[in-house]
Protein backbone atom coordinates (compact mmCIF):
# COMPACT_ATOMS: atom_id res chain seq x y z
CA UNK A 1 0.00 0.00 0.00
CA UNK A 2 1.34 3.43 -0.87
CA UNK A 3 2.48 5.83 1.83
CA UNK A 4 -0.10 8.37 0.68
CA UNK A 5 -3.04 6.08 1.52
CA UNK A 6 -6.31 7.88 2.15
CA UNK A 7 -9.20 6.96 4.44
CA UNK A 8 -11.20 5.81 1.42
CA UNK A 9 -8.42 3.38 0.49
CA UNK A 10 -8.16 2.09 4.04
CA UNK A 11 -11.92 1.34 4.08
CA UNK A 12 -11.41 -1.16 1.28
CA UNK A 13 -8.69 -3.10 3.03
CA UNK A 14 -8.66 -5.95 5.52
CA UNK A 15 -6.03 -5.97 8.30
CA UNK A 16 -2.89 -8.02 8.57
CA UNK A 17 -0.71 -7.65 11.70
CA UNK A 18 1.57 -4.65 11.33
CA UNK A 19 0.35 -3.68 7.85
CA UNK A 20 -2.75 -3.54 5.65
CA UNK A 21 -3.42 -5.71 2.62
CA UNK A 22 -6.17 -5.59 0.00
CA UNK A 23 -9.04 -7.96 0.62
CA UNK A 24 -12.74 -8.21 0.00
CA UNK A 25 -14.92 -6.71 2.69
CA UNK A 26 -16.05 -9.37 5.16
CA UNK A 27 -18.44 -9.18 8.13
CA UNK A 28 -16.91 -8.91 11.56
CA UNK A 29 -15.21 -12.19 12.34
CA UNK A 30 -16.72 -12.81 15.75
CA UNK A 31 -20.29 -13.08 14.44
CA UNK A 32 -19.54 -16.28 12.53
CA UNK A 33 -17.09 -17.58 15.10
CA UNK A 34 -19.50 -16.94 17.97
CA UNK A 35 -22.20 -18.90 16.13
CA UNK A 36 -19.70 -21.71 15.64
CA UNK A 37 -18.98 -21.79 19.39
CA UNK A 38 -22.67 -21.79 20.24
CA UNK A 39 -23.33 -24.74 17.94
CA UNK A 40 -20.38 -26.79 19.22
CA UNK A 41 -21.40 -26.05 22.82
CA UNK A 42 -24.96 -27.17 22.07
CA UNK A 43 -23.77 -30.44 20.50
CA UNK A 44 -21.43 -31.13 23.45
CA UNK A 45 -24.12 -30.48 26.07
CA UNK A 46 -26.69 -32.54 24.13
CA UNK A 47 -24.33 -35.53 23.92
CA UNK A 48 -23.42 -35.29 27.62
CA UNK A 49 -26.95 -34.96 28.97
CA UNK A 50 -28.53 -37.68 26.87
CA UNK A 51 -25.57 -40.03 27.30
CA UNK A 52 -26.16 -39.74 31.04
CA UNK A 53 -29.86 -40.34 30.46
CA UNK A 54 -29.37 -43.47 28.33
CA UNK A 55 -26.58 -44.96 30.45
CA UNK A 56 -28.36 -44.37 33.75
CA UNK A 57 -31.82 -45.58 32.72
CA UNK A 58 -32.77 -48.63 30.71
CA UNK A 59 -36.51 -47.97 30.57
CA UNK A 60 -36.48 -44.57 28.93
CA UNK A 61 -40.14 -43.90 29.42
CA UNK A 62 -40.44 -44.95 33.07
CA UNK A 63 -37.46 -43.22 34.61
CA UNK A 64 -38.79 -40.55 36.97
CA UNK A 65 -37.37 -38.26 39.62
CA UNK A 66 -38.50 -39.23 43.08
CA UNK A 67 -39.90 -36.69 45.51
CA UNK A 68 -42.81 -34.28 45.88
CA UNK A 69 -42.40 -33.42 42.19
CA UNK A 70 -41.90 -36.47 39.97
CA UNK A 71 -41.09 -35.25 36.46
CA UNK A 72 -39.68 -37.59 33.86
CA UNK A 73 -35.90 -37.59 33.50
CA UNK A 74 -36.52 -36.76 29.86
CA UNK A 75 -38.09 -33.46 30.93
CA UNK A 76 -35.29 -32.86 33.42
CA UNK A 77 -32.70 -33.56 30.72
CA UNK A 78 -34.24 -31.11 28.26
CA UNK A 79 -34.49 -28.41 30.95
CA UNK A 80 -30.90 -29.06 32.05
CA UNK A 81 -29.58 -28.80 28.52
CA UNK A 82 -31.19 -25.41 27.91
CA UNK A 83 -30.19 -24.10 31.34
CA UNK A 84 -26.59 -25.19 30.73
CA UNK A 85 -26.43 -23.42 27.37
CA UNK A 86 -27.97 -20.31 28.92
CA UNK A 87 -25.36 -20.39 31.70
CA UNK A 88 -22.58 -20.49 29.10
CA UNK A 89 -24.05 -17.45 27.34
CA UNK A 90 -24.78 -15.47 30.52
CA UNK A 91 -21.32 -16.37 31.82
CA UNK A 92 -19.86 -14.59 28.75
CA UNK A 93 -17.87 -17.61 27.69
CA UNK A 94 -18.23 -16.37 24.10
CA UNK A 95 -16.91 -12.86 24.77
CA UNK A 96 -14.97 -11.92 21.65
CA UNK A 97 -12.26 -10.35 23.80
CA UNK A 98 -11.26 -13.61 25.50
CA UNK A 99 -11.95 -16.34 22.93
CA UNK A 100 -9.09 -17.64 20.86
CA UNK A 101 -6.19 -17.06 23.27
CA UNK A 102 -5.30 -17.47 26.92
CA UNK A 103 -6.91 -19.50 29.72
CA UNK A 104 -9.79 -17.11 30.50
CA UNK A 105 -12.13 -18.73 27.96
CA UNK A 106 -11.68 -22.18 29.52
CA UNK A 107 -11.96 -20.79 33.05
CA UNK A 108 -15.31 -19.20 32.23
CA UNK A 109 -16.61 -22.45 30.73
CA UNK A 110 -15.70 -24.37 33.90
CA UNK A 111 -17.13 -21.59 36.10
CA UNK A 112 -20.45 -21.49 34.24
CA UNK A 113 -20.73 -25.30 34.38
CA UNK A 114 -19.96 -25.35 38.08
CA UNK A 115 -22.64 -22.72 38.75
CA UNK A 116 -25.33 -24.60 36.84
CA UNK A 117 -24.41 -27.78 38.74
CA UNK A 118 -24.76 -25.89 42.04
CA UNK A 119 -28.10 -24.45 40.89
CA UNK A 120 -29.42 -27.95 40.11
CA UNK A 121 -28.36 -29.12 43.58
CA UNK A 122 -30.12 -26.18 45.26
CA UNK A 123 -33.30 -26.56 43.19
CA UNK A 124 -33.50 -30.28 43.86
CA UNK A 125 -33.18 -29.58 47.59
CA UNK A 126 -35.81 -26.82 47.62
CA UNK A 127 -38.26 -28.83 45.51
CA UNK A 128 -37.41 -32.07 47.35
CA UNK A 129 -36.52 -33.82 44.13
CA UNK A 130 -34.20 -36.83 44.41
CA UNK A 131 -32.14 -36.64 41.23
CA UNK A 132 -29.92 -39.69 40.83
CA UNK A 133 -26.29 -38.89 41.67
CA UNK A 134 -25.12 -41.25 38.93
CA UNK A 135 -27.01 -39.21 36.35
CA UNK A 136 -25.30 -35.98 37.42
CA UNK A 137 -21.92 -37.71 37.83
CA UNK A 138 -22.03 -38.63 34.13
CA UNK A 139 -23.61 -35.48 32.67
CA UNK A 140 -21.48 -32.72 34.17
CA UNK A 141 -17.94 -34.13 33.85
CA UNK A 142 -18.64 -35.45 30.35
CA UNK A 143 -20.27 -32.18 29.28
CA UNK A 144 -17.40 -30.09 30.64
CA UNK A 145 -14.81 -32.17 28.79
CA UNK A 146 -16.77 -32.08 25.54
CA UNK A 147 -17.37 -28.33 25.67
CA UNK A 148 -13.69 -27.68 26.40
CA UNK A 149 -12.67 -30.04 23.59
CA UNK A 150 -14.96 -28.21 21.18
CA UNK A 151 -13.46 -24.87 22.25
CA UNK A 152 -9.95 -26.24 21.75
CA UNK A 153 -10.71 -27.47 18.23
CA UNK A 154 -12.37 -24.16 17.36
CA UNK A 155 -9.37 -22.26 18.70
CA UNK A 156 -6.95 -24.29 16.60
CA UNK A 157 -9.04 -23.59 13.51
CA UNK A 158 -9.09 -19.88 14.39
CA UNK A 159 -5.32 -19.85 14.80
CA UNK A 160 -4.83 -21.39 11.36
CA UNK A 161 -7.05 -18.71 9.86
CA UNK A 162 -5.19 -15.94 11.65
CA UNK A 163 -1.80 -17.21 10.52
CA UNK A 164 -3.16 -16.87 7.00
CA UNK A 165 -4.16 -13.25 7.71
CA UNK A 166 -7.91 -13.89 8.07
CA UNK A 167 -10.43 -13.31 10.89
CA UNK A 168 -8.54 -10.36 12.32
CA UNK A 169 -9.85 -7.35 14.22
CA UNK A 170 -9.18 -3.99 12.57
CA UNK A 171 -7.29 -1.81 15.05
CA UNK A 172 -6.36 1.86 15.21
CA UNK A 173 -3.33 2.48 17.46
CA UNK A 174 -3.23 5.75 19.39
CA UNK A 175 -0.30 7.35 21.17
CA UNK A 176 3.05 9.10 20.96
CA UNK A 177 4.88 8.13 17.77
CA UNK A 178 7.54 6.10 19.54
CA UNK A 179 5.06 4.25 21.75
CA UNK A 180 2.65 3.72 18.87
CA UNK A 181 5.52 2.21 16.87
CA UNK A 182 6.34 -0.16 19.73
CA UNK A 183 2.70 -1.26 19.99
CA UNK A 184 2.39 -1.80 16.23
CA UNK A 185 5.53 -3.94 16.33
CA UNK A 186 4.15 -5.89 19.32
CA UNK A 187 0.86 -6.59 17.55
CA UNK A 188 2.66 -7.64 14.37
CA UNK A 189 4.73 -10.13 16.37
CA UNK A 190 1.66 -11.86 17.81
CA UNK A 191 -0.54 -12.90 14.88
CA UNK A 192 -2.58 -15.29 17.03
CA UNK A 193 -3.85 -12.32 19.05
CA UNK A 194 -5.87 -11.44 15.96
CA UNK A 195 -5.14 -7.73 15.61
CA UNK A 196 -4.42 -6.06 12.29
CA UNK A 197 -3.41 -2.42 12.53
CA UNK A 198 -5.11 -0.27 9.88
CA UNK A 199 -4.10 3.16 11.10
CA UNK A 200 -2.30 5.24 13.71
CA UNK A 201 -3.39 8.42 15.48
CA UNK A 202 -0.57 10.33 17.16
CA UNK A 203 -0.63 12.50 20.27
CA UNK A 204 2.49 14.54 19.53
CA UNK A 205 2.42 17.30 16.95
CA UNK A 206 0.91 17.72 13.47
CA UNK A 207 0.64 14.90 10.92
CA UNK A 208 2.71 15.35 7.74
CA UNK A 209 1.05 14.15 4.54
CA UNK A 210 1.89 10.53 3.84
CA UNK A 211 3.49 9.77 7.23
CA UNK A 212 3.58 6.10 8.26
CA UNK A 213 4.60 4.09 11.30
CA UNK A 214 6.18 0.76 10.30
CA UNK A 215 4.24 0.96 7.04
CA UNK A 216 0.93 1.79 8.74
CA UNK A 217 -0.53 5.18 7.70
CA UNK A 218 -0.87 7.95 10.27
CA UNK A 219 -4.48 9.06 9.82
CA UNK A 220 -4.80 11.84 12.38
CA UNK A 221 -4.20 13.01 15.92
CA UNK A 222 -5.63 11.81 19.22
CA UNK A 223 -8.47 14.34 18.85
CA UNK A 224 -9.51 12.70 15.58
CA UNK A 225 -9.22 9.12 16.87
CA UNK A 226 -12.91 8.27 17.35
CA UNK A 227 -13.92 9.60 13.95
CA UNK A 228 -10.96 7.92 12.25
CA UNK A 229 -11.92 4.59 13.87
CA UNK A 230 -15.44 4.94 12.49
CA UNK A 231 -14.21 5.97 9.05
CA UNK A 232 -11.94 2.95 8.65
CA UNK A 233 -14.53 0.58 10.19
CA UNK A 234 -12.18 -0.34 13.03
CA UNK A 235 -13.15 -3.03 15.52
CA UNK A 236 -11.00 -1.58 18.30
CA UNK A 237 -8.74 1.30 19.26
CA UNK A 238 -5.61 0.55 21.27
CA UNK A 239 -4.27 3.42 23.38
CA UNK A 240 -0.58 3.45 24.30
CA UNK A 241 0.42 5.71 27.17
CA UNK A 242 1.90 9.18 26.85
CA UNK A 243 1.95 12.41 28.83
CA UNK A 244 -0.48 13.98 26.37
CA UNK A 245 -3.07 11.21 26.84
CA UNK A 246 -4.47 11.81 30.30
CA UNK A 247 -7.05 9.72 32.13
CA UNK A 248 -9.65 12.41 31.37
CA UNK A 249 -8.79 12.35 27.67
CA UNK A 250 -9.15 8.58 27.52
CA UNK A 251 -12.48 8.75 29.32
CA UNK A 252 -13.77 11.25 26.75
CA UNK A 253 -12.51 8.97 23.97
CA UNK A 254 -14.63 6.22 25.50
CA UNK A 255 -17.64 8.53 25.39
CA UNK A 256 -16.95 9.28 21.72
CA UNK A 257 -16.91 5.55 20.96
CA UNK A 258 -20.12 4.71 22.82
CA UNK A 259 -22.71 3.04 20.62
CA UNK A 260 -20.24 2.41 17.80
CA UNK A 261 -19.41 -1.18 18.78
CA UNK A 262 -15.71 -0.27 18.70
CA UNK A 263 -13.77 -1.71 21.64
CA UNK A 264 -11.41 0.43 23.71
CA UNK A 265 -8.17 -1.22 24.84
CA UNK A 266 -5.66 0.54 27.09
CA UNK A 267 -2.02 0.15 27.95
CA UNK A 268 -1.62 -1.19 31.49
CA UNK A 269 -0.43 2.18 32.81
CA UNK A 270 -3.82 3.70 31.91
CA UNK A 271 -6.16 1.09 33.39
CA UNK A 272 -7.07 3.23 36.40
CA UNK A 273 -9.37 5.42 34.31
CA UNK A 274 -12.45 3.22 34.17
CA UNK A 275 -12.81 1.63 37.60
CA UNK A 276 -14.88 -1.57 37.67
CA UNK A 277 -15.51 -1.41 33.93
CA UNK A 278 -11.90 -2.41 33.26
CA UNK A 279 -11.74 -6.01 32.05
CA UNK A 280 -8.57 -7.14 33.80
CA UNK A 281 -7.76 -9.68 31.15
CA UNK A 282 -4.56 -9.21 29.14
CA UNK A 283 -5.20 -9.20 25.42
CA UNK A 284 -3.51 -12.43 24.35
CA UNK A 285 -0.55 -11.67 26.58
CA UNK A 286 -0.18 -8.16 25.18
CA UNK A 287 0.33 -5.21 27.56
CA UNK A 288 -3.27 -3.99 27.17
CA UNK A 289 -6.59 -4.22 28.96
CA UNK A 290 -10.12 -3.83 27.62
CA UNK A 291 -12.61 -1.30 28.97
CA UNK A 292 -16.29 -2.23 28.87
CA UNK A 293 -18.66 0.29 27.32
CA UNK A 294 -21.19 1.40 29.95
CA UNK A 295 -24.76 0.24 29.28
CA UNK A 296 -27.87 2.13 30.31
CA UNK A 297 -30.61 -0.43 29.60
CA UNK A 298 -31.22 -4.17 29.71
CA UNK A 299 -31.81 -6.82 32.39
CA UNK A 300 -29.50 -5.10 34.87
CA UNK A 301 -31.63 -1.96 34.81
CA UNK A 302 -34.88 -3.95 34.90
CA UNK A 303 -33.62 -5.56 38.12
CA UNK A 304 -32.75 -2.11 39.51
CA UNK A 305 -36.27 -0.84 38.73
CA UNK A 306 -37.88 -3.86 40.40
CA UNK A 307 -35.61 -3.39 43.43
CA UNK A 308 -36.61 0.29 43.60
CA UNK A 309 -40.35 -0.43 43.56
CA UNK A 310 -40.21 -3.20 46.17
CA UNK A 311 -38.01 -1.18 48.52
CA UNK A 312 -40.09 2.00 48.07
CA UNK A 313 -43.27 0.14 49.02
CA UNK A 314 -41.63 -1.41 52.08
CA UNK A 315 -40.17 1.92 53.24
CA UNK A 316 -43.47 3.75 52.75
CA UNK A 317 -45.33 1.13 54.80
CA UNK A 318 -42.76 1.15 57.60
CA UNK A 319 -42.47 4.94 57.75
CA UNK A 320 -46.15 5.78 57.20
CA UNK A 321 -46.61 6.89 60.85
CA UNK A 322 -43.59 9.19 60.57
CA UNK A 323 -44.87 10.61 57.28
CA UNK A 324 -48.21 11.41 58.92
CA UNK A 325 -46.50 13.15 61.86
CA UNK A 326 -44.26 15.23 59.58
CA UNK A 327 -47.21 16.22 57.38
CA UNK A 328 -49.18 17.35 60.43
CA UNK A 329 -46.19 19.31 61.76
CA UNK A 330 -45.67 21.12 58.45
CA UNK A 331 -49.35 22.07 58.33
CA UNK A 332 -49.40 23.27 61.94
CA UNK A 333 -46.19 25.34 61.96
CA UNK A 334 -46.47 27.49 58.82
CA UNK A 335 -48.97 28.72 56.28
CA UNK A 336 -49.09 26.97 52.94
CA UNK A 337 -49.44 23.46 51.50
CA UNK A 338 -47.90 20.39 53.11
CA UNK A 339 -46.11 19.30 49.94
CA UNK A 340 -43.83 21.20 47.60
CA UNK A 341 -43.88 20.30 43.90
CA UNK A 342 -41.18 21.37 41.47
CA UNK A 343 -40.24 20.60 37.89
CA UNK A 344 -36.96 18.69 37.71
CA UNK A 345 -35.05 17.17 34.80
CA UNK A 346 -34.91 13.37 34.77
CA UNK A 347 -33.54 10.61 32.59
CA UNK A 348 -32.81 11.59 28.98
CA UNK A 349 -33.82 15.18 29.74
CA UNK A 350 -37.49 14.40 30.45
CA UNK A 351 -39.11 16.71 33.01
CA UNK A 352 -41.13 15.45 35.96
CA UNK A 353 -42.63 16.93 39.14
CA UNK A 354 -40.65 16.05 42.22
CA UNK A 355 -42.60 16.02 45.51
CA UNK A 356 -41.16 16.94 48.90
CA UNK A 357 -42.41 18.06 52.28
CA UNK A 358 -42.43 21.85 52.23
CA UNK A 359 -39.44 23.12 54.20
CA UNK A 360 -39.64 26.77 53.06
CA UNK A 361 -42.12 29.58 53.19
CA UNK A 362 -44.96 29.35 50.70
CA UNK A 363 -43.89 30.76 47.32
CA UNK A 364 -40.20 30.49 48.21
CA UNK A 365 -39.20 29.34 44.74
CA UNK A 366 -40.38 32.64 43.28
CA UNK A 367 -37.85 34.34 45.59
CA UNK A 368 -34.93 32.36 44.13
CA UNK A 369 -33.61 35.21 41.98
CA UNK A 370 -33.79 37.58 44.92
CA UNK A 371 -31.78 35.22 47.13
CA UNK A 372 -29.30 33.80 44.62
CA UNK A 373 -29.03 36.49 41.95
CA UNK A 374 -28.83 35.85 38.23
CA UNK A 375 -25.90 33.40 38.40
CA UNK A 376 -27.32 30.15 39.69
CA UNK A 377 -24.52 27.68 40.52
CA UNK A 378 -24.82 23.94 40.12
CA UNK A 379 -25.92 22.08 43.28
CA UNK A 380 -27.02 25.40 44.72
CA UNK A 381 -27.99 25.31 48.37
CA UNK A 382 -27.44 28.17 50.81
CA UNK A 383 -26.05 27.33 54.22
CA UNK A 384 -28.16 30.15 55.63
CA UNK A 385 -31.37 30.47 53.59
CA UNK A 386 -33.91 33.02 54.91
CA UNK A 387 -36.72 31.18 53.12
CA UNK A 388 -36.38 28.00 55.24
CA UNK A 389 -38.83 27.62 58.11
CA UNK A 390 -37.68 26.56 61.61
CA UNK A 391 -39.25 23.13 61.12
CA UNK A 392 -37.76 23.02 57.63
CA UNK A 393 -34.26 23.26 59.09
CA UNK A 394 -34.90 20.09 61.12
CA UNK A 395 -36.47 18.29 58.15
CA UNK A 396 -33.51 19.17 55.94
CA UNK A 397 -30.91 18.21 58.51
CA UNK A 398 -32.29 14.67 58.65
CA UNK A 399 -33.52 14.60 55.01
CA UNK A 400 -37.11 14.00 56.12
CA UNK A 401 -38.32 16.48 53.49
CA UNK A 402 -37.09 14.05 50.80
CA UNK A 403 -39.23 11.08 51.89
CA UNK A 404 -42.25 11.87 49.63
CA UNK A 405 -39.93 11.32 46.66
CA UNK A 406 -40.60 7.63 47.27
CA UNK A 407 -43.81 8.26 45.32
CA UNK A 408 -41.67 9.51 42.41
CA UNK A 409 -39.80 6.20 42.66
CA UNK A 410 -43.08 4.27 42.45
CA UNK A 411 -44.05 6.32 39.38
CA UNK A 412 -40.81 5.30 37.67
CA UNK A 413 -39.50 8.88 37.54
CA UNK A 414 -36.74 8.38 40.08
CA UNK A 415 -34.60 5.62 41.53
CA UNK A 416 -33.63 5.05 45.15
CA UNK A 417 -30.00 5.69 44.19
CA UNK A 418 -28.82 7.95 41.40
CA UNK A 419 -27.65 11.47 40.55
CA UNK A 420 -29.35 14.36 42.24
CA UNK A 421 -32.30 15.73 40.15
CA UNK A 422 -31.81 19.33 39.11
CA UNK A 423 -33.88 22.17 37.68
CA UNK A 424 -33.76 23.45 34.09
CA UNK A 425 -31.56 26.43 34.92
CA UNK A 426 -28.90 24.16 36.39
CA UNK A 427 -29.05 21.67 33.51
CA UNK A 428 -28.58 24.54 31.06
CA UNK A 429 -25.08 24.99 32.55
CA UNK A 430 -24.03 21.36 32.02
CA UNK A 431 -20.86 20.56 30.15
CA UNK A 432 -20.38 17.26 28.37
CA UNK A 433 -19.42 15.37 31.53
CA UNK A 434 -22.37 16.69 33.54
CA UNK A 435 -24.83 15.75 30.77
CA UNK A 436 -24.00 12.09 31.42
CA UNK A 437 -25.93 12.41 34.69
CA UNK A 438 -29.08 12.35 32.53
CA UNK A 439 -28.37 8.85 31.18
CA UNK A 440 -30.00 7.25 34.25
CA UNK A 441 -32.90 8.08 36.54
CA UNK A 442 -32.15 10.66 39.24
CA UNK A 443 -31.99 9.27 42.75
CA UNK A 444 -33.52 9.91 46.15
CA UNK A 445 -29.96 9.51 47.42
CA UNK A 446 -26.63 9.01 45.71
CA UNK A 447 -22.89 8.85 45.89
CA UNK A 448 -22.76 12.65 46.26
CA UNK A 449 -24.90 12.51 49.42
CA UNK A 450 -22.88 9.87 51.24
CA UNK A 451 -19.62 11.61 50.29
CA UNK A 452 -20.24 15.00 51.81
CA UNK A 453 -23.84 15.95 50.96
CA UNK A 454 -24.20 19.75 50.77
CA UNK A 455 -20.52 20.25 51.58
CA UNK A 456 -19.42 19.08 48.15
CA UNK A 457 -18.26 21.51 45.51
CA UNK A 458 -20.15 21.37 42.17
CA UNK A 459 -17.11 19.83 40.46
CA UNK A 460 -16.81 17.08 43.09
CA UNK A 461 -20.54 16.37 42.93
CA UNK A 462 -20.54 16.06 39.15
CA UNK A 463 -17.48 13.83 39.18
CA UNK A 464 -19.07 11.47 41.69
CA UNK A 465 -22.39 11.41 39.85
CA UNK A 466 -20.72 10.63 36.51
CA UNK A 467 -18.65 7.90 38.18
CA UNK A 468 -21.83 6.39 39.60
CA UNK A 469 -23.66 6.57 36.24
CA UNK A 470 -20.92 4.64 34.46
CA UNK A 471 -19.98 2.13 37.15
CA UNK A 472 -23.02 1.42 39.36
CA UNK A 473 -23.86 -2.04 40.66
CA UNK A 474 -26.81 -3.28 42.70
CA UNK A 475 -24.45 -4.17 45.56
CA UNK A 476 -23.05 -0.65 45.37
CA UNK A 477 -26.60 0.74 45.60
CA UNK A 478 -27.16 -1.24 48.78
CA UNK A 479 -23.92 0.13 50.24
CA UNK A 480 -25.00 3.71 49.38
CA UNK A 481 -28.42 3.17 50.99
CA UNK A 482 -26.80 1.95 54.22
CA UNK A 483 -24.33 4.86 54.20
CA UNK A 484 -27.22 7.26 53.55
CA UNK A 485 -29.10 5.94 56.57
CA UNK A 486 -26.02 6.56 58.72
CA UNK A 487 -25.49 10.07 57.32
CA UNK A 488 -29.16 10.95 57.85
CA UNK A 489 -29.23 9.72 61.46
CA UNK A 490 -26.09 11.70 62.25
CA UNK A 491 -27.26 14.74 60.27
CA UNK A 492 -23.91 14.98 58.50
CA UNK A 493 -23.30 17.67 55.86
CA UNK A 494 -26.91 18.76 55.36
CA UNK A 495 -28.43 22.22 55.66
Image: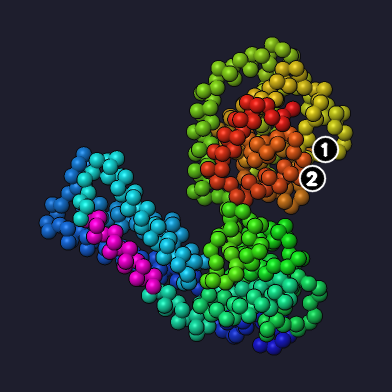
Residue at figure coordinates x 59%, y 64% from the top left: 289
Which residue appears at 55% of the width and 82% of the height? 24
Residue marked by disc 1:
376
Q: Give the numbered dot on residue 104.
A: none
Instruction: Check if residue 446 falls in the magenta segment.
Output: no
| Residue 178 lies in quadrant | bottom right
Rendered position, 305 above or below 270: above
Q: Quadrant of the C terminus?
A: top right
Which image quarter: residue 227?
bottom right
Q: Locate residue 477, reporting x and y percent.
A: 56, 40
Report the predominant secondary structure element of the magenta stretch: helix
| Image location (x, y in percent) of residue 339 | 67, 22
53 or 240: nearer the eye?
240
For the residues bearing labels 2 and 1, Cβ distance under 8 angstroms: yes
User: Residue 138 magenta-drawn?
Assistant: yes
Highlighted range, magenta = 135-152
Q: Which residue is mark 2?
A: 429
Q: Earlier in the sequence, mark 2 or mark 1?
A: 1
The correct choice, above or below, for 320 with respect to 372 in the image is: above
Could you tell me residue 148's position as x and y percent? 36, 68
Amino acid sequence: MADTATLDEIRQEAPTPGRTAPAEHQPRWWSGYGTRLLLTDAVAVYIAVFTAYVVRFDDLGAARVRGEMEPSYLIVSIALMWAWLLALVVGRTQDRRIVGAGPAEYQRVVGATWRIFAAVAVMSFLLRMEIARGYLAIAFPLGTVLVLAGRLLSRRWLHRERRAGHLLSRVVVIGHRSKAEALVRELAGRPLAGFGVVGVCVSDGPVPLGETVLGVPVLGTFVDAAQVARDVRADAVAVSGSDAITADAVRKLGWDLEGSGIDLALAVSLTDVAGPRVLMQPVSGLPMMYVDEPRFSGPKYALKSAFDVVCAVVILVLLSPLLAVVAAAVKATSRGPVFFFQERVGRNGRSFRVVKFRSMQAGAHAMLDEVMGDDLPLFYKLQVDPRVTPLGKVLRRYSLDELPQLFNVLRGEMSLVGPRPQIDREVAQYDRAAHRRLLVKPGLTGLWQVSGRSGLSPEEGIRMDVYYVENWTLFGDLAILFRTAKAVVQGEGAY
